[in-house]
Image (tube, rainbow, N blue to C red):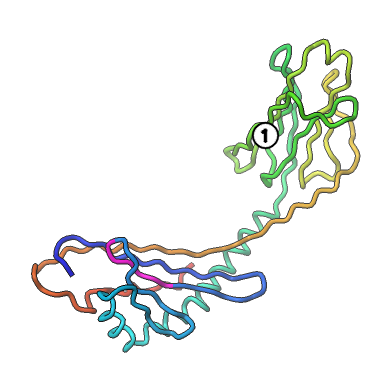
Amino acid sequence: MSSGIHTWQRKFGCELHDDGSITGYSQYAYDGEDFIRLDLNTVSWIAANDKAVIIKQEWDQTPTAFNQKNFLENDCILCTKKYVDVGKATLEGKVRPKVFLYQRDSSEVVCHATGFFPKALMISWQKNGEDLHEDVDLRETLPNLDDTFQKKSILTVSPEELDKHNYTCIVQHISLEKEMVLQVNNHRVSAGGLIGIVIAAAVTVLLVVVVIFVWKKKQPGKRRNASNFNMLKLSSDC
């Protein structure tokens, strides 16, 4: 290995799949390039290049591969399950939206929903009971400071059209048993029919830790041996 400053990187992680199966990985990089990785099936190290062969030979003589396999398939999975439970509790929380209907100018009507959770929410418009898609500007969902969300949809329509037709804003969210229907005329809210909403939330948890270890060679010209490549101890804390 050459003298100077180098980077020694490690990345490891585990995945718990819906069918209960477990996968994991542990790999190292030297100066940004793949160097050596753990094969969980054979519980041995795989060298990515000729320079890593000497490291593989030394590491294969230690119990580190078995220790890391045990960590990835046990401690790491326990942490993953913990985070899944925490995430599920958060994802299953529901907060009803507050919806406001107002005119920003003579030709724009704004339907604004805010304070809702989870993020998925639908705003649509109807004209005389028929779905309306033209002249509608649906804005992206934005976060609020309290971890809820807000979203708005802007309908461009002339005052003459507002007088001639019946326009309504319809809001659908998983927290609502029925759709919320806001009448543009007189800005009154009316009860709406039941809308069936099915939202599937898939949680994929990937626990990844990347550690960068930087060192400077103190004795130029001396070949580095395998002991210089620290395996970096895994922690079961989560």
Q: Position of residue 26 (x, y in %)?
A: 42, 72
Image height of 48 relative to 211, above or below: below
Circle 1 SS class: strand
Instruction: Tell me the chief SS of the magenta region.
Output: strand
Amino acid type at circle 1 is: Lys
Image height of 184 relative to 215, above or below: above
Q: Is residue 38 magenta?
A: no
Image height of 113 relative to 176, above or below: above
Answer left or right for 91 relative to 227. Answer: right
Answer left or right for 193 relative to 56. Answer: right
Q: Residues within 10 Å of mark 1 (few under 14, many from 20)?
A: many
Q: Depth check: 199 or 178 in front?
A: 199
Q: Position of residue 141 (x, y in %)?
A: 64, 37
Q: Position of residue 212 (x, y in %)?
A: 32, 62
Q: Residue at x 70, y 55 (%)?
A: 92
Q: Position of residue 45 (x, y in %)?
A: 37, 81
Reading the image, the residue beneath label 1 is 151
Write down the quadrant of residue 127 in the picture: top right
Q: Depth check: 221 or 98 in front?
A: 221
Write down the quadrant of residue 139 in the picture: top right
Magenta residue span: 26-31
